[in-house]
Image (spheres, grey):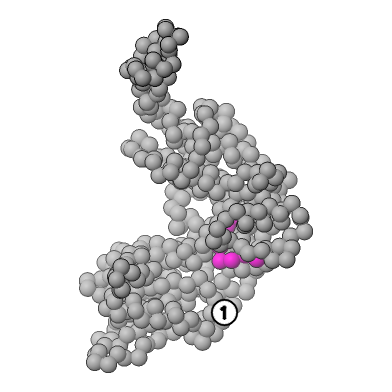
């Protein structure tokens, strides 16, 4: 039986289970610049990363939170919705609506999407690829590799060491999917998913085990026939590269799938704006850089452009208890630099807020630069979190759009 512990970002967790605590301590000590949590007396304190850490059968779920509400189901569903939006979980057959995300683990978002993707691939037929093989055979096939032939067959005169090509299903994509299915069979704790995983393993052709690194995935190229594999391979990458078996010979393996909440918020705002402003004639880009000193660059989170005018946004996943009084001076200075280098009279910082905070957006302006005729505005935009992801995305776009349009009207 699995044990699920749910906490929120920046919270501390006291751990009485000595094996669990030791595994988390070792996992922390084995990584440089470890971002997920820090060690405290008899426990850990989580940082601004959210997601899940599974140690053996224990699942620690770390949820985001932008207000004083401790409703776990609300924040779990919000996080799942954000992840689906940002990482484009475009599930194929039967449809995304068939996914039944259970209320006790975000891991199942990935496990179930992966299972659905592999079911789809099996249903439509696994692809074959041309594979180059070197082998010592009893009959001549393909091209003889003379140096290896002489080395291997001085005694075995009737053999041929050859290089040949075969059209087969035993290629890297299927090896990765099979390895991931075997991993899920080992670490999944949901009985309904387990039966599906076992059924897939019965129907999926058995593949040899392979050693997997980041470079394994970097070498993959997709063709028209294999494009359908992309979603499943992306999830396989996430699971295989973040699984740490038997830490230092112990009995507890660790799977950590964690997301920087600041980056997730930035990507969520960006995709929301692209979706709702793109059809209004606005060009929305992220991480647009400009040189500002020697080879160093400035890079705002989001740049919105129409004609020759820029709007600059920086997203901050943090709660300001007292609106403008709590804003970081360095954030304002950074926005001023963006305004100058992009010649953008309209810049803004975008924060989430909860119903319990009731933040109102603030229109603020920088002091006018000598000899400059135009004022430069830096607004604080507070967008209330909504558990309906589609409504929330619409709200993000409409509030940001209305702020800039108002600024534009006032400046004319």
Q: Compared to 370, does 293 lie above or below?
A: above
Where is residue 263 shown, x and y percent of the image?
47, 64
* Magenta-drawn segment: 45-52
Where is residue 235 shown, x and y percent of the image?
49, 46
Q: Which residue is at the front of the view, 98 or 214?
A: 214
**Residue occupying the point 73% across, 45% down:** 1
Query: In the visual, does 160 lie left or right of 100?
Result: left
Query: In the visual, does 100 lie left or right of 124?
Result: right
Is 176 part of what is drawn in magenta? no
Q: Is residue 212 visible?
A: yes
Residue hosting label 1: 357
**Residue occupying the point 42% across, 19% down:** 135
Q: Which residue is at the front of the view, 13 or 216?
A: 216
Mark 1 neighbour density, 10 Å: few (under 14) some (14–19) many (20 or more): some
Q: Compared to 240, does 359 lie above or below?
A: below
Query: In the visual, does 246 lie left or right of 126?
Result: right
Where is residue 175 shown, x and y percent of the image?
48, 33
Q: Which residue is at the front of the view, 318 or 218?
A: 218
**Residue occupying the point 76% across, 55% down:** 17
Q: Compared to 349, does 196 lie above or below?
A: above
The majority secondary structure of the magenta stretch comes to: strand
**Residue occupying the point 36% across, 19% down:** 147
């Amino acid at each position: 039986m699995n044990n699920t512990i749910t906490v929120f970002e920046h919270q501390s967790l006291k751990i009485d289970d000595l094996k669990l605590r030791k595994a988390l301590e070792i996992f922390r000590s084995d990584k440089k610049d470890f971002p997920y949590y820090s060690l405290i007396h008899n426990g850990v304190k989580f940082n601004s990363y959210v997601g899940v850490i599974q140690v053996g059968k224990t699942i620690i779920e770390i949820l985001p939170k932008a207000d004083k509400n401790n409703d776990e189901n609300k924040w779990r569903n919000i996080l799942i919705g954000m992840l689906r939006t940002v990482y484009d979980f475009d599930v194929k057959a039967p449809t995304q609506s068939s996914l039944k995300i259970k209320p006790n683990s975000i891991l199942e978002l990935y496990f179930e999407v992966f299972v659905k993707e592999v079911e789809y691939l099996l249903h439509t037929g696994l692809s074959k690829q041309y594979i180059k093989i070197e082998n010592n055979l009893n009959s001549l096939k393909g091209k003889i590799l003379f140096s290896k032939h002489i080395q291997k067959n001085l005694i075995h005169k009737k053999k041929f060491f050859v290089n040949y090509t075969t059209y087969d299903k035993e290629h890297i994509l299927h090896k990765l999917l099979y390895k991931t299915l075997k991993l899920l069979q080992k670490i999944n704790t949901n009985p309904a998913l387990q039966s599906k995983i076992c059924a897939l393993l019965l129907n999926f052709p058995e593949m040899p085990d392979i050693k997997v690194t980041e470079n394994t995935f970097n070498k993959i190229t997709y063709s028209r026939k294999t494009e359908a594999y992309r979603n499943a391979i992306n999830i396989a990458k996430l699971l295989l590269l973040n699984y740490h078996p038997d830490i230092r010979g112990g009995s507890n393996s660790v799977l950590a799938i964690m997301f920087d909440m600041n980056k997730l918020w930035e990507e969520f705002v960006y995709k929301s704006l692209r979706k709702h402003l793109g059809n209004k004639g606005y060009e929305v880009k992220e991480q647009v850089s400009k040189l500002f000193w020697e080879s160093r660059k400035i890079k705002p989170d989001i740049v919105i452009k129409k004609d020759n005018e820029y709007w600059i946004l920086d997203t901050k996943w943090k709660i300001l208890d007292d609106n403008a009084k709590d804003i970081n001076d360095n954030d304002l200075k950074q926005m001023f630099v963006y305004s100058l280098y992009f010649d953008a009279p309209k810049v803004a910082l975008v924060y989430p807020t909860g119903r319990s905070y009731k933040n109102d957006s603030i229109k603020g302006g920088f002091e006018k630069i000598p000899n400059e005729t135009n004022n430069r505005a830096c607004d604080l935009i507070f967008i209330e979190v909504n558990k309906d992801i589609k409504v929330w995305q619409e709200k993000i776009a409409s509030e940001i759009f209305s702020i800039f349009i108002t600024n534009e009207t006032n400046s004319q």
